[in-house]
Image: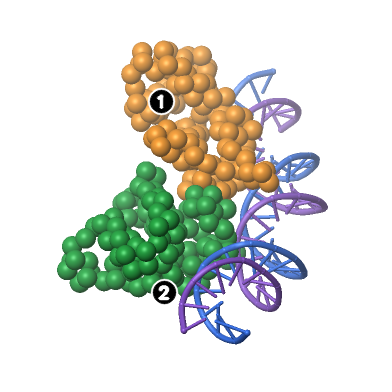
Chain colours: A green, B orange, C purple, D blue
Amino acid sequence: MSREIRRTMPLLSMSIVMQLTELSARQIRYYEEHHLIEPHRTEGNRRMFSLNDVDILLEIKDYLEQGMNIAKIKKIFTKKQDPAVAEETNLSDTELRRVMREEMRQAQRMQKSSIRQGDLSRFY
Amino acid sequence: MSREIRRTMPLLSMSIVMQLTELSARQIRYYEEHHLIEPHRTEGNRRMFSLNDVDILLEIKDYLEQGMNIAKIKKIFTKKQDPAVAEETNLSDTELRRVMREEMRQAQRMQKSSIRQGDLSRFY
DNA sequence: ATGGAGATGTAAGGTTTTCTTACATGGTTT
DNA sequence: AAACCATGTAAGAAAACCTTACATCTCCAT
């Protein structure tokens, strides 16, 4: 089984994802509502999350704590998905996040900076 | 976070473990009843399984399909947990499983009726 | 063949978890 | 102040899971 499949395999229930991310169910559903994640559904309509989803949620949380809003975060994600942009900028995810954070700090002069990063790579 | 914690962190619900192992809930609970696994419980008493639990379940399934019974499997597990034995034999899990399989096949080939459990004790 | 033991199926009744929907609330921005 | 954004909360319904208990099937020994 490839690493990619492992990352995207829907294994986790809502309650576990809440624990892993320290987000409320309300928050997680809200982010889904805005298409930042798209968890799988069981036959009974329960959400099932992948490790990748958890990573994204941690990233969202990080961005929000930096003062970004959902619309902006969505833009960042679509940018990152664009292969042209990715190649053009030639930035790793981590670097891109750092750059964006820097940009936001500059733009808004926010000074609550507790850098926390969700590294879930340990699980797969 | 250590690799050990990763393996033992209770992340998975019953339904997912059923899918991953292709075992029924009844079977999984039965193996727990016989102390082959000890899944964590949520506050609401739901079982939560670790990746390690899934590994063990797959191993149990494998052994059962080779014709072993629960009592025997439990013995193997407790043996493997014994650090003295583990060092002495110096076998990886995979190797041990292969050896046991081989042995069972041989036992079946020899004569089904006369094999007693104690006869194979030298192998673990 | 008969009976017992081991492993699993299944049903009932109850509890926990999750779902959607809708409204409320506390900060920001305009 | 009004609008907007992100989140909290409540209600009612449905899914998933729990324990308990009995049924079934296959081996194996008597």
Residues behind callouts 2 and 1 on a single chain: no
Of the two numbered discs 2 and 1 in the rendering, the one whose residue sits closer to the viewer: 2
Residue B62 visible in the displayed image: no
Instruction: Specify the label residue A71 is tagged with.
Output: 2
Which residue type carries mark 2?
Answer: Ala
Instruction: Specify the label residue B91 is tagged with.
Output: none
Specify whether B21 is left or right of A2. right
Identify the secondary structure beneath mark 1: helix
Residue A49 position in % (x across, y down): 48, 58
Residue A83 position in % (x across, y down): 23, 69
Picture residue at 42% right of the left edge, 33% below the top:
B4
Instruction: Specify the label residue B100 is tagged with.
Output: 1
Viewport quadrant of the C terminus of chain B: top left
Picture residue at 34% right of the left edge, 26% below the top:
B92
- Which residue is at the front of the view, B28 or A38? A38
Specify whether A36 is left or right of A28. left
| Chain letter, disc 2 residue | A
Residue B111 position in % (x across, y down): 46, 22
Q: Are marks 2 and 1 in contact (CB under 8 Å)?
A: no
Picture residue at 53% right of the left edge, 56% below the top:
A23
- Which residue is at the front of the view, A111 or B95? A111
Picture residue at 62% right of the left edge, 40% below the top:
B41
